[in-house]
Amino acid sequence: MPRRFALTLATTLVVAAGLQTVSANDAADAVTATPSPYVQSVLQDAPVAMLQGLTDLTGRTAAGSAVGSPTTTRLPNGDEARAFDGKGQYLQFPDSKAFEVDATGVLTVEYWMRPDTLQFSDEEGSGYVYTMGKGNAGSHEWYTRMYSKINAESRPNRISGYVFNPTGGLGAGSFFQDTVQTGAWIHVALVINSKAKSTQYPLGYTKIYKNGVLRDTDSLADYNIVPKSGSAPLRIGTGYLNSFFQGAVGDVAFYDKELSATRLVAHQQAMYQAAPAPAPAPAPAPTTTASHVVATNVARGSNMLVRYTPAWGTSTRTNQYGLEATVVNGAITTMVNGVGNAPIPTNGYVLSGHGDSRQWLLDHAKVGSTVTVSGTTLTVTTVTTTARTTTTAARTTSTARRSGSSAYVKAVMRDDPNALLQGLTDLTGRGPAGTAVGSPARTRLPNGDVARAFDGKGQFLRFADRKAFEVDHTGVLTVEYWMRPDTLQFSDEEGSGYVYTMGKGNAGSHEWYTRMYSKANDESRPNRISGYAFNPAGGLGSGSYFQDTVKAGRWIHVALVVNTKARSNAYPTGYLRIYKNGVLRDTDSLKDYNIVPRSGSAPLRVGTGYLDSFFQGAIGDIAFYPRELSGASLRSHYAAGV
């Protein structure tokens, strides 16, 4: 790795490279442009700075300068970001209280990063680079860091954030360490809180979030850290010029408070929300009106619907077992299912429904619905656009395609699936309708789309054999779906204690299946969710999985990829991958069990595999693609579905 001889040498190189600055007119143009849904979501939380390119979109801090001409690139939503070559390029912003911890005692730094290599060429320390930070020798403050895949501390591609005493030395920090893919964007938030002191955290703590999920919390007292402000600039793409990040960074926001996990999740999801396109004024549409008993500003109990106003506090303080709709100016602006503790707007309120009331909201409300409250009666009025349906498959498909599709269906359709099964209908119109065995009940996905619920006692859906459901039609198959386990211990299992949730195959002509294990099983795989590809004769299959705590009644977004064309030394005959809620969780080689997928004539079954076990729960919006979908596409689909 390169050696540093003196800070003055680095400074000389900066001067030689020259600075690129942004003019006042450039800044004005950036601010007056229509902000993306992501920027709007962030600005709702009142950051003290939000840096996009060289401009602070809040207008509170001075424009930055670019060293070494980093190139302009784009975030998943099209927002501007900067890409660094890892050879001395970075951005620099003048010292500001907005970038300091001890201005208020709390600092949240939220940003998107895209590593373009897993092994950095210009490292420091044990083999890492700083992605951004504020500090100089003798006046260190805080930094974010990424390790090379190979480093002296066995921390492959660890991503972390640290706060230091001014003199440096060891810092207190938090991290996550997952498999990283080059070119994939990651949403990161670092919290440094020196005010939230407790017996466990006598000097405060650091926290780090990945894609809106809290991953680690650490005590400032571990290294007796007392953050102090200095005069160093903020640098992005480096820390204090001793290493340089190769990759891109964008939409860097700073807050003088600790953001909640709920808001960070909302921000992450907004990145994949399409900007609304202008449309002609709609003709008057029919409406539906429904009423429900509502309580106000009380703890939400079983099956209750509660209205939380600002008098209750800044958030609802509810658990995740419900649905919450934010109402501003008499209309629903957001609906979030399965998260809880929603922020309460100062100019509105939040409706929080549990159990039957949650289902009532799903059935009768959507974003844009108008809401009125009179005493203890809440009334929701919703514009309806669904056309009259018929019993024939052709007419049903036509109606589904003409009626107003959900944001999720629109997001999926943009990626051109070969099939999108909703209930018994293929919304692409490319295949015949399915049949239901045992009368599975209708239910709803979090966004209101129709799904089917299976009792685990023989109910399933069946769709005729099609190339759309097969791997070797193109050599690649992506299966994307939503599932809701309604029990953690299945009654009609097979094998070591699992059920197949869907799949294509029969005895002697197995193809692929998705699976869920019971909590108690013979292989100690509690509620593992997995997908497998088999040789026609069956036996052991190649599969990928994730194994997390599962809660009955909670929807999960899953995508299984079987790819026989992407061959490499690591995957000589291809691989399987599985994603949960848009995040890649596992990749496995087809070569492990010498799997060569072959098409057969079996139907696709949903709720079972080949009739030897039956899933108890619900499944909906099943999409099939003849290619591998990117993580970015899957994350955008997931965001549209919640």
Image (cartoon, rainbow, N blue to C red):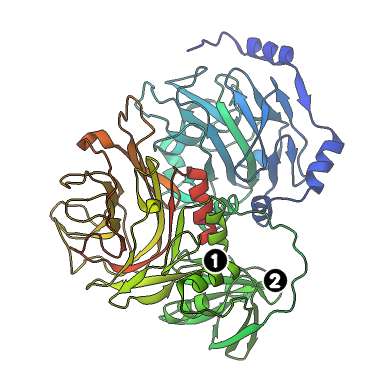
First in sequence: mark 1 or mark 2? 1
Residue at left 43%, top 43%?
219
| x and y, in percent, of residue 199 in the image | 40, 52
- Answer few, some or many: residues within 10 Å of disc 1's Cα (few below 14, many 20 plus, some between 14 and 19): many
Q: In this view, does 209 lie to the left or right of 14?
A: left
Q: Kindly identify the amino acid type of the residue bearing the numbered disc 1.
A: Ala
User: In the picture shown, does residue 624 fall above or below 344?
Assistant: above
Residue 497 x %, y %: 16, 59
Q: Is mark 2 on a helix, strand or loop?
A: loop
The type of residue carrying mark 2 is Asn
Residue at 35% from the left image edge and 45% from the top image edge? 471
**SS for callout 1:** loop
Q: Name the residue located 17 percent from the left edge and 60 percent from the top edge.
A: 520
Q: How crowded is mark 2: few (under 14 residues within 10 Å), some or many (20 or more)?
A: few
Reading the image, the residue beneath label 1 is 342
Q: Name the residue at 44% across, 42% down.
A: 628
63 sits to left or right of 248: right
In space, the residues marked 1 and 2 are separated at their CA atoms by 14 Å
Toward which corner of the image does residue 10 lie, by quadrant?
top right
Q: Position of residue 15 (x, y in %)?
A: 73, 14
